[in-house]
Image: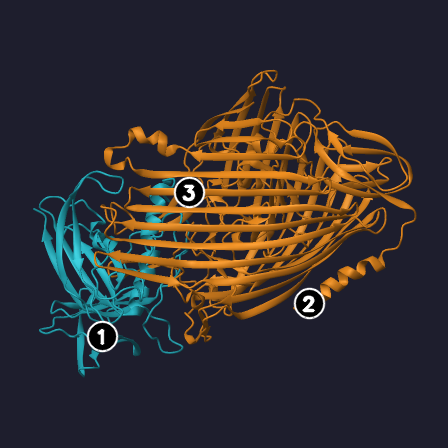
Chain colours: A cyan, B orange
């Protein structure tokens, strides 16, 4: 994802080619269990997914593992929270943030007596200063219309990893996902400065915005490991194009006891800031 | 360095092994085209009906040992009248031969001074050559003759897909091909990603691909050598060649600087899609840039009868951009200075000094073009010198020996980010390498039927740095290696070195006049690596040297073959090969290959093997010309931590490949050609399961094995017709009308997995085809 804009640029000017759906014969792989848990510092509902995988092709949906016990342990604050199963999810309705910046947290998932664990530490996140809207004329890069620019200042003093997530109107399934390091793309490059231009305009992935529309911009802090995981995930899940990376399996940070069937997926804690903008 | 002395000792000892051959004298000279003074490479010089035979070298020079007395000397070359002269030699004698072209049947686009090296007149196996005339006769993409596309019709040469950059030879990676333009290394041979090669056919005289037991003078790569030699230029009269095509135009000018002594050639090309598109672009897009160009130039000067100087260079660039907001450019430049010196009729010295640079730049800026932005640059430079001495010792021995030095200077990446109130840089520090080589080779006519080419090359490679030396700890394969410690140095320091002794041995046995058996073995090592984990290499992929953490890779190639010439002028050949490759690079799954100062931590080393059978029938003369070849081959890799540690098919394994090309000359003005290519689909890894992570469907392969599926087979038919004007006219011209991908096949470039656009809950496999229709073209070529 870090350099995906390079490939976008290359693709923009290379032969556009054609893409068509094809029927291929792939044997469905052996089913495995996976966890999808991104716990935030918000007081909104927190959820953990424990599912069985599904065949990739087609429309089958991963089914929930219904008999798991899911416990979130905040090691720093010495607290434990048990998630309850409801409609395919393990959920928790907090009255205060389960995790705060700096907290070390362990997720424990027990299925059929086997304990699977994962850990993470919540990193800091800056505020989103503003989202400004601009009119852009028609060009090779942009259709004519209204576009946004997000203004964020990186926090000084350490290397920070961020996930800039943009959702459009509530009925629009499309989602913009961009990753950043210290407001740029590389470690040790600069610190404590405003996010650079390609990131500022990253919220326009599905622009231009229509009048009356809504944009939700969320900035999430990540650990370095989660940053690497998401970078790979975004690459493999958008694997089209002449310069697409070859399909590789994303890693997992879920620890499976020896001799047990491996559980996959990812657990992360993320501090979050968000802004909602309505297009006039 | 102790090995260097050993090799020199061996070479210097050779004369002791050579017996005197009786009272013989030396006949030597140059063979040239009488009309334009271009030297003729691989022309055959034979004395007294093939009792004594030799061939001219890359500079048109020959030297042959014959007894004193009366002889008939003949020089022959395809498309030329045979030169014949009776001489009475009593002492060493020079005889230059200026050959006349047979007639004007060869059109004006034919680059003369070339002759295909037939399999019967080389000792080594796996040598392929296409004449420029053949390259230009083949149907071409967008009507533009292309050297690399033509090479792809040769057995054992493939690519991962249409428009991909580079080529794969006998199961090797694309970075395992040494591509040299007048001996200067070229790192990216493609324009427009991979649709066109950077070599202007109007400026090229000779193209030779060594894919097996390559000669001892070449080294530094493990798969093949593509040796491209530029034209010298007409030393008799001024000549202008050009062409106006669908994508770009070509113009070359050549002529004498001093008749018979000095000549020049300058050739340029530029694409003009951007120029043609400009009137149709709106105001905001008018400053868009998308073009490529190249300029090739060469000059030579005959200092004396014994000494000639050549200076040649290439400069090319691809540029894409939108105003000042986004710009992307890459290009090669090379320079070569060569000096031929005839020490004696038996001793021919060539000294070459080369320079090459491949660089790319990428920049993004805010619309105002000044205040904020991001710039990224990278380059690789080489500086080389290589004196080579050829000694035509006697009728049985021809020795070649030399020394090579090549200095690499890698700037793996520099990124500069500018904001309104700051400027920051991330700089990967330069890495350096020295490649020092000594080589010696004897072409030994053991008996009338058996000839051997016995060579050895010693390569010493040093990895140098003047900044940090990283030391990593070993860890679980396919996991980023943890940094153990960093050694800081502040002057140029050798961090590591390696030495490889590389035998290069070939045998040719003439069973009958028209039946030849061959066998050969070669070892070769490689010190630079292309870091690319995408479906096709990109222009921004990084070349990185072998370091204290990355071992050089090396290969052993064994091959054997048989060649049969039929009475109808058809050459039939069969070759088998087995190649074993060691210390090949691979990457951890989560590799970060761009602007990563510690990229070595993300690299893995593995092994590879490839084997196959190549069959070919070809006819190079007459009204009907062409070739049909079939290759069956396999290419595997094995790397700890990848694909369950088992052997897996490499990305460029095409099991069955069939190429067919036919050229029909109807008369002096009209010719037509057709070309058909078929190849098994390349291996791919498909997703057999998925999980939703944060609402994103993530494809997953539960077998953990790589490349167990294949994308659909590739095939394509191209046609072209060439119509020339009256050859008697001063301005000679021709129209080339072509059709590429005649039956509009949508050949798969890749298969990938995505959510259905209309219904994101449905996941599907999608096929990317870079070309999906027939591509017609018209090109007008001229010459005066």
Asked if badge 2 and badge 1 are on a common chain, one would say: no
Question: In front: mark 2 or mark 1?
Answer: 2
> Label 3 near label 1: C-beta < 8 Å?
no
Taking the image as shown, residue B491 lies to the left or right of residue B389, namely left
Question: What residue sits 62% from the left and 37% below the top?
Answer: B232
On residue B3, which mark appears? 2
Please tell me whether mark 1 sits on a helix, a strand or a loop.
strand
Q: Quadrant of residue A135?
A: top left
Please tell me whether mark 3 sits on a helix, a strand or a loop.
strand
Q: Nearer the viewer, residue A58 or A234?
A: A234
Q: Position of residue A182 (x, y in %)?
A: 25, 64
In the rendered view of the protein, which quadrant contains the C terminus of chain B? top right
Q: Position of residue B651 (x, y in %)?
A: 49, 53
Q: Does any portion of residue B593 appear in the rendered image?
A: yes
On residue A70, which mark appears? 1
Mark 2 belongs to chain? B
Please tell me whether mark 2 sits on a helix, a strand or a loop.
helix
On residue A119, which mark appears? none
Q: Residues within 10 Å of mark 3 (few under 14, many from 20)?
A: many
State how far apart marks 1 and 3 are (Cα). 55 Å
Q: Quadrant of residue A192?
A: bottom left
Q: Does any portion of residue B504 appear in the rendered image?
A: no
Question: In front: mark 1 or mark 3?
Answer: 3
Q: Position of residue A40 (x, y in %)?
A: 18, 69
Q: Name the residue that disc number 3 marks.
A: B318
């Amino acid at each position: 994802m870090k350099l995906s804009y390079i490939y976008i640029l290359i693709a923009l000017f290379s032969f556009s080619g054609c893409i068509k759906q094809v029927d291929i014969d792939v044997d469905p792989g052996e089913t495995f269990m996976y966890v999808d848990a991104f716990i935030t510092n918000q007081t909104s509902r927190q959820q953990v997914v424990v599912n069985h995988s599904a065949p990739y092709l087609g429309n089958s949906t991963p089914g929930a593992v219904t008999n798991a016990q899911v416990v979130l342990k905040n090691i720093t604050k010495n607290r434990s929270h048990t998630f309850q199963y409801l409609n395919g999810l393990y959920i928790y309705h907090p009255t205060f943030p389960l995790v705060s910046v700096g907290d070390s947290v362990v997720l424990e998932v027990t299925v059929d007596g086997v304990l699977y664990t994962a850990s993470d530490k919540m990193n800091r996140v800056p505020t989103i200063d503003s989202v400004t809207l601009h009119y852009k004329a028609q060009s090779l890069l942009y259709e004519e219309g209204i576009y946004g620019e997000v203004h964020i200042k990186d926090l000084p003093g350490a290397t920070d990893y961020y996930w800039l997530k943009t959702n459009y109107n509530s009925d629009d399934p499309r989602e913009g996902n961009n990753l950043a390091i210290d407001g740029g793309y590389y470690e040790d490059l600069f610190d404590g400065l405003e996010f650079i231009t390609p990131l500022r305009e990253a919220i326009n992935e599905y622009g231009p915005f229509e009048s009356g529309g809504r944009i939700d911009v969320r900035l999430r802090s990540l650990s370095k490991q989660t940053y690497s995981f998401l970078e790979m995930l975004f690459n493999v899940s958008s694997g089209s194009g002449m310069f697409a990376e070859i399909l590789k399996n994303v890693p997992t940070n879920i620890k499976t006891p020896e001799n047990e069937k491996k559980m996959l997926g990812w657990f992360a804690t993320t501090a979050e800031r968000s802004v909602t903008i309505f297009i006039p | 360095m102790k090995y260097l002395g050993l090799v020199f000792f061996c070479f210097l000892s050779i004369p002791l092994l050579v017996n005197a051959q009786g009272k013989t004298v030396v006949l030597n000279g140059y063979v040239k085209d009488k009309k334009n003074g271009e030297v003729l490479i691989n022309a055959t010089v034979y004395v007294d009906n093939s009792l004594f035979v030799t061939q001219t070298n890359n500079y048109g020079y020959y030297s042959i040992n014959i007894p004193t007395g009366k002889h008939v000397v003949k020089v022959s070359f395809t498309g030329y009248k045979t030169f014949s002269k009776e001489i009475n030699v009593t002492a060493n004698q020079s005889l230059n031969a200026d050959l006349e072209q047979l007639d004007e049947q060869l059109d004006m686009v034919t680059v003369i001074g070339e002759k295909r090296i037939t399999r019967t007149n080389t000792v080594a196996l796996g040598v392929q050559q296409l004449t420029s005339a053949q390259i230009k006769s083949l149907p071409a993409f967008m009507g533009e003759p292309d050297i690399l596309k033509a090479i792809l019709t040769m057995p054992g040469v493939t690519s991962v897909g249409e428009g991909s950059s580079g080529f794969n030879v006998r199961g090797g990676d694309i970075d395992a091909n040494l591509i040299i333009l007048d001996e200067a290394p070229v790192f990216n041979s493609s324009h427009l990603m991979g649709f066109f090669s950077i070599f202007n056919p109007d400026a090229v005289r000779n193209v030779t691909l060594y894919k097996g037991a390559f000669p001892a003078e070449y080294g530094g790569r493990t798969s093949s050598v593509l040796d491209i030699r530029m034209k010298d230029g007409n030393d008799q009269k001024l000549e202008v060649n050009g062409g106006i095509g669908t994508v770009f135009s070509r113009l070359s000018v050549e002529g004498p600087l001093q008749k018979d002594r000095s000549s020049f050639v300058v050739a340029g090309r530029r694409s003009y899609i951007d120029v043609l598109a400009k009137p149709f672009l709106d105001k905001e897009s008018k400053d868009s840039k998308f073009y490529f160009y190249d300029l090739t130039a060469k000059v030579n000067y005959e200092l004396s009868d014994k000494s000639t100087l050549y200076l040649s260079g290439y400069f090319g660039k691809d540029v894409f951009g939108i105003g000042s907001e986004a710009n992307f450019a890459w290009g090669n430049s090379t320079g070569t200075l060569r000096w031929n010196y005839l020490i004696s009729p038996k001793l021919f010295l060539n000294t070459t000094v080369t320079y090459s640079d491949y660089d790319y730049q990428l920049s993004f800026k805010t619309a105002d073009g000044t205040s904020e932005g991001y710039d990224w640059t990278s380059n690789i430079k080489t500086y080389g010198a290589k004196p080579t001495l050829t000694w035509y010792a006697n009728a049985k021995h021809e020795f070649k020996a030399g020394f090579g030095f090549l200095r690499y200077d890698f700037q793996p990446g520099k990124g500069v980010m500018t904001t309104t109130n700051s400027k920051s840089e991330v700089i990967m520090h330069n890495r350096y390498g020295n490649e020092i080589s000594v080589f010696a080779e004897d072409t030994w006519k053991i008996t009338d039927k058996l000839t051997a080419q016995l060579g050895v090359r010693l390569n010493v490679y040093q990895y140098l740095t003047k900044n940090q030396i990283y030391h990593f700890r070993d860890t679980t394969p396919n996991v980023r290696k943890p940094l153990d410690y960093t050694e800081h140095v502040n002057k140029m320091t050798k961090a590591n070195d390696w030495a490889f002794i590389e035998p290069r041995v070939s045998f040719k046995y003439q069973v009958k006049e028209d039946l030849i058996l061959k066998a050969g073995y070669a070892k070769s090592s490689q010190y630079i690596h292309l870091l690319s984990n995408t479906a096709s290499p990109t222009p921004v992929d990084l070349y990185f040297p072998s370091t204290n953490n990355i071992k050089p890779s090396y290969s052993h190639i064994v091959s054997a073959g048989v060649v049969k010439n039929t009475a109808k002028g058809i050459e039939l050949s069969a070759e088998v090969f087995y190649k074993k490759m060691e210390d090949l690079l691979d990457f951890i799954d989560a590799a970060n290959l761009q602007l990563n100062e510690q990229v070595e931590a993300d690299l893995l080393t593995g092994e590879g093997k490839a084997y196959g059978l190549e069959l070919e029938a070809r006819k190079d003369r007459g009204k009907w010309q062409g070739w049909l070849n079939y290759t069956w081959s396999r290419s595997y890799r094995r790397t700890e931590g990848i694909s369950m540690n088992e052997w897996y098919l490499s990305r460029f394994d095409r099991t069955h490949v069939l190429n067919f090309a036919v050229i029909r000359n109807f008369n002096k003005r009209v010719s037509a050609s057709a070309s058909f290519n078929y190849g098994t689909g390349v291996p791919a890894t498909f997703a057999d399961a998925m999980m939703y992570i944060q609402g994103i469907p993530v494809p997953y392969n539960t077998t953990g094995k790589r490349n167990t599926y294949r994308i659909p087979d590739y095939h394509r038919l191209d046609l072209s017709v060439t119509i020339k004007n009256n050859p008697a006219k001063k301005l000679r011209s021709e129209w080339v009308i072509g059709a590429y991908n005649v039956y509009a096949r949508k050949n798969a470039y890749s298969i990938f997995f995505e959510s259905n656009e209309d219904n994101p809950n449905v996941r599907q496999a999608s096929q990317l085809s870079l070309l999906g229709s027939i591509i017609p073209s018209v090109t007008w070529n001229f010459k005066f």
